[in-house]
């Protein structure tokens, strides 16, 4: 069994196309989508249309939940996407599950098995964000009965194998390689390069899972220009560099 995992596309259709092309060259059995699909000032409608046509196993992220919520409490990324989406696309998003089991031993989540906002493989402290410890990861995994747990949300490609053998993999973000946030404490998440990220998990004959993290080139300069034209100058440096910075 060979599974490609994509997550956190954030309406970046060019990055998605580059990742899908790279996946196609590697001959996987199935590609799964871990949420945060369209929110952002890029191409939400075209991204939703592309993914609806593919009909991948897909879960919702916190941004799918938020863009269907109260407009008065909606962030700018969600509001931009909601205004662009067609009624049938909103209906598709509304029908997405929060988690999904693939076969008996693979679990898809956005944040953790119980939250779409909690970071699984990263921890936020007053000093900022850092990689989570194995103890922290095990606490968040809880009793989730799956040999492989695929998660997203943080945009940081990581994998951790727990002492009991469970493998937790975050493929990173297809569409946005850096952001800042103030949830829990102010912090920055950044990968340092603008490449689109995804992962491939593979099960050996003995049933054990391993994973490889992949980074793919695409026209990130075009994405940065589109974000700027659509009113998000704060996305320009993250899209161009994979870092949080100041537009110059």
Image: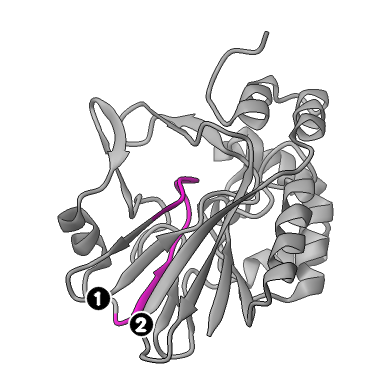
The secondary structure type at the circle numbered 2 is: loop
For the point 35% across and 82% down, the residue is 208
Question: Which is more toward the observer, 63 or 42?
Answer: 42
The secondary structure type at the circle numbered 1 is: loop
* Res 150 visible: yes
Q: Is residue 41 above or below residue 99?
A: above
Residue 101 is situated, as x and y percent measured from the top left of the image, at 46, 82
Identify residue for label 2: 208
Residue 20 part of the magenta segment: no
Q: Are marks 1 and 2 in contact (CB under 8 Å)?
A: yes
Label 1 – label 2 distance at C-alpha: 8 Å
Tell whether 173 sits left or right of 142. right
Q: Is residue 232 above or below residue 107?
A: above
Q: Which residues are magenta?
A: 145-158
Residue 25 is situated, as x and y percent measured from the top left of the image, at 73, 68
For the point 77% across and 35% down, the residue is 223
Q: What number is the disc on residue 165?
A: 1
């Amino acid at each position: 069994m060979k599974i490609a995992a994509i997550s956190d596309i954030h309406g970046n259709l060019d990055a998605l196309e580059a990742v899908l092309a790279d996946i196609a060259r590697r001959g996987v059995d199935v590609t799964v989508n871990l949420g945060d699909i369209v929110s952002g000032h890029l191409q939400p409608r075209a991204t939703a249309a592309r993914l609806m046509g593919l009909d991948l196993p897909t879960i919702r992220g916190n941004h799918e939940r938020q863009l269907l919520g109260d407009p008065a409490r909606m962030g700018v990324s969600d509001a931009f996407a909601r205004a662009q989406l067609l009624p049938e696309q909103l209906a598709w998003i509304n029908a997405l599950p929060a988690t999904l089991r693939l076969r008996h031993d693979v679990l898809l989540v956005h944040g953790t098995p119980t939250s779409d906002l909690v970071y699984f493989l990263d921890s936020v402290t007053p000093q900022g964000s850092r990689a989570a410890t194995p103890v922290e990861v095990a606490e968040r995994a809880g009793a989730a009965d799956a040999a492989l747990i695929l998660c997203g949300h943080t945009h940081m490609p990581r994998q951790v194998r727990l002492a009991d053998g469970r493998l937790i993999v975050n493929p990173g973000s297809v569409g946005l390689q850096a952001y800042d946030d103030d949830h829990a404490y102010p912090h920055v998440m950044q990968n340092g390069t603008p490449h689109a990220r995804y992962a491939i998990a593979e099960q050996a004959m003995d049933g054990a899972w391993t994973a490889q993290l992949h980074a793919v080139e695409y026209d990130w300069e075009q994405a940065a220009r589109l974000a700027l034209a659509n009113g998000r100058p704060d996305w320009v440096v993250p899209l161009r560099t994979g870092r949080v910075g100041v537009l110059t």
